[in-house]
């Protein structure tokens, strides 16, 4: 016991005061993420592994990450997993299969114009990219164009897409980007209602939308993921990996002959990859790379992206109402972000709070799944527009 305590004390003494403070800050951050996951139930499947991983990689001379000891390189399991699953974009793509298998595109297929709201709600991505470039113009060296693109994708409200794009550009800010993306996704029930109320009136929030159930043919459900993949491949070739895996998962769900594979993708595969993903991204949350002024900027830019994604969708709905006979409740435009199904539930609850007979769930869900597609395509467009 004495030898152990002596070794531990020696490890701490070898650290400078600045390194010790950084380590304690990262432990605190990890503890905060775990608290939010357990106590507040905010995206627990990801925040808990990320929080625990942040502690793991910031222990003195942590064996969880690759390090050099006495001139010899010792491979750490989290670093190995990062190279095997995130450095080559494998984990995010496999997770998209599970997400695709979970999504029912029926509400969207019964009212295809809802896809437009998903496109409008990506406004925050491009505004944030522009703002990040503007910050770099004022303070040269803050963000490269590739860094700005990776930061902008936080606005997609889609963690796997954020991981894919950030890793594609090899940005050193991946840890901050992922913490921002997943934290703000968890805060959707807090952020979105405030944004919606800011740009809508009570009369608009009380608008009812009758829902006429219309069956979608099985052949349409099967063709949809195939057609979307082909179109996305033509419009934004770099999005094929993202869109293709998402749509393949949906095809497993809709084909009707692979129920076992569909259930495996939705449960076992998605859960396993989520655990690995949450732990592994912590490799990019080591104190030296994470505790920088840019991290605070990225957290601010992430909030900016989420706010303007929400406002963009709502304002598009209000614009559409000026030219259409069948009016829509502007709140459903906020569901164009990719935070499925949290955003549609938030809007549904807001509708009921304003009018207990105002049922918006199916309309909101249609916009929400459209946002899932739009966010992935937007990520592909970013990859096409900004060179590596």
Image: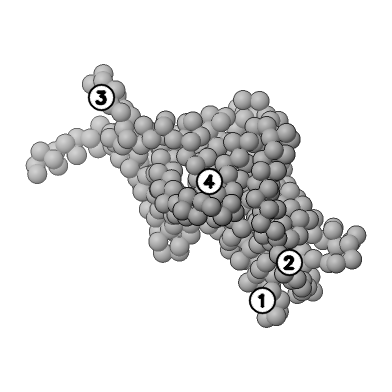
Q: Nearer the viewer, mark 3 or mark 2?
A: 2
Q: Secondary structure at mark 3?
A: strand
Q: Is residue 190 left or right of residue 237?
A: left
On residue 69, the disc is: 3
Which quadrant of the rendered structure holds the N terminus?
A: top left
Residue at mark 2 to residue at mark 4: CA–CA distance:
27 Å
- Residue 176 % position (x, y): 51, 41
Among the two numbered marks 4 and 3 on one chain, the one whose residue lies closer to the N terminus: 3
Classify residue 242 by image quadrant.
top right
Q: Determine crowd level at label 4: few under 14, some 14-19, many 20+ residues with C-alpha closer than 10 A.
A: many
Among the two numbered marks 1 and 4 on one chain, the one whose residue lies closer to the N terminus: 4
Labels 1 and 4 touching (C-beta < 8 A): no
Residue at mark 2 to residue at mark 1: CA–CA distance:
23 Å
Q: Nearer the viewer, residue 126 or 81?
A: 81
On residue 214, the disc is: 2
On residue 97, the disc is: 4
Among the two numbered marks 3 and 2 on one chain, the one whose residue lies closer to the N terminus: 3
Q: Is residue 278 left or right of residue 361?
A: left
Q: Nearer the viewer, mark 1 or mark 3?
A: 1
Q: Residue furthest front?
A: 257
Q: Which residue is mark 1?
A: 352
- Residue 355 % position (x, y): 71, 79
Residue 336's place in the image compared with 299, above or below, is below
Q: Determine crowd level at label 3: few under 14, some 14-19, many 20+ residues with C-alpha closer than 10 A.
A: few
């Amino acid at each position: 016991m004495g030898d152990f305590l002596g070794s531990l004390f020696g490890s701490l003494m070898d650290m400078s005061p600045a390194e010790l403070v950084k380590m304690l800050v990262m432990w605190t951050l990890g503890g905060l993420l775990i608290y939010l996951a357990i106590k507040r139930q905010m995206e627990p499947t990801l925040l808990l592994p990320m929080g625990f991983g942040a502690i793991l990689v910031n222990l003195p001379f942590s064996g969880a990450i690759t390090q050099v000891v006495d001139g010899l390189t010792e491979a750490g399991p989290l670093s190995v997993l990062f190279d095997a699953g995130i450095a080559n974009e494998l984990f995010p793509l496999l997770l998209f299969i599970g997400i695709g298998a979970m999504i029912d595109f029926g509400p969207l297929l019964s009212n295809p114009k809802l896809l437009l709201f998903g496109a409008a709600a990506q406004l925050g991505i491009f505004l944030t990219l522009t703002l990040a470039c503007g910050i770099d113009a004022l303070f040269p060296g803050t963000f490269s164009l590739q860094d700005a693109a990776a930061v902008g994708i936080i606005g997609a409200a889609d963690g796997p897409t954020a991981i894919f794009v950030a890793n594609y550009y090899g940005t050193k800010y991946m840890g901050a980007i992922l913490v921002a993306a997943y934290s703000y996704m968890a805060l959707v029930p807090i952020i979105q209602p405030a944004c919606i109320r800011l740009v809508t009136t009570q009369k608009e929030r009380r608008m009812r939308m009758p829902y006429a159930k219309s069956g979608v043919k099985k052949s349409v459900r099967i063709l949809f993921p195939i057609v979307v993949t082909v179109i996305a491949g033509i419009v934004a070739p770099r999005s094929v990996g993202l869109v293709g895996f998402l749509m393949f998962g949906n095809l497993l769900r809709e084909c009707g002959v692979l129920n076992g594979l569909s259930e495996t993708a939705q449960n076992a595969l998605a859960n396993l990859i989520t655990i690995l993903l949450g732990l592994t991204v912590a490799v990019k949350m080591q104190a030296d790379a994470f505790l920088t002024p840019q991290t605070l900027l990225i957290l601010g830019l992430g909030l900016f992206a989420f706010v303007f994604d929400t406002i963009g969708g709502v304002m598009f709905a209000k614009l559409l109402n000026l030219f259409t006979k069948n009016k829509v409740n502007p709140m459903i435009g906020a569901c164009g972000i990719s935070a499925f199904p949290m955003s549609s539930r938030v809007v549904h609850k807001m509708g009921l709070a304003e009018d207990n007979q105002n049922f918006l769930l199916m309309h909101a869900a249609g916009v929400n799944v459209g946002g899932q597609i739009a966010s992935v395509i937007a990520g592909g467009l970013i990859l096409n527009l900004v060179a590596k």
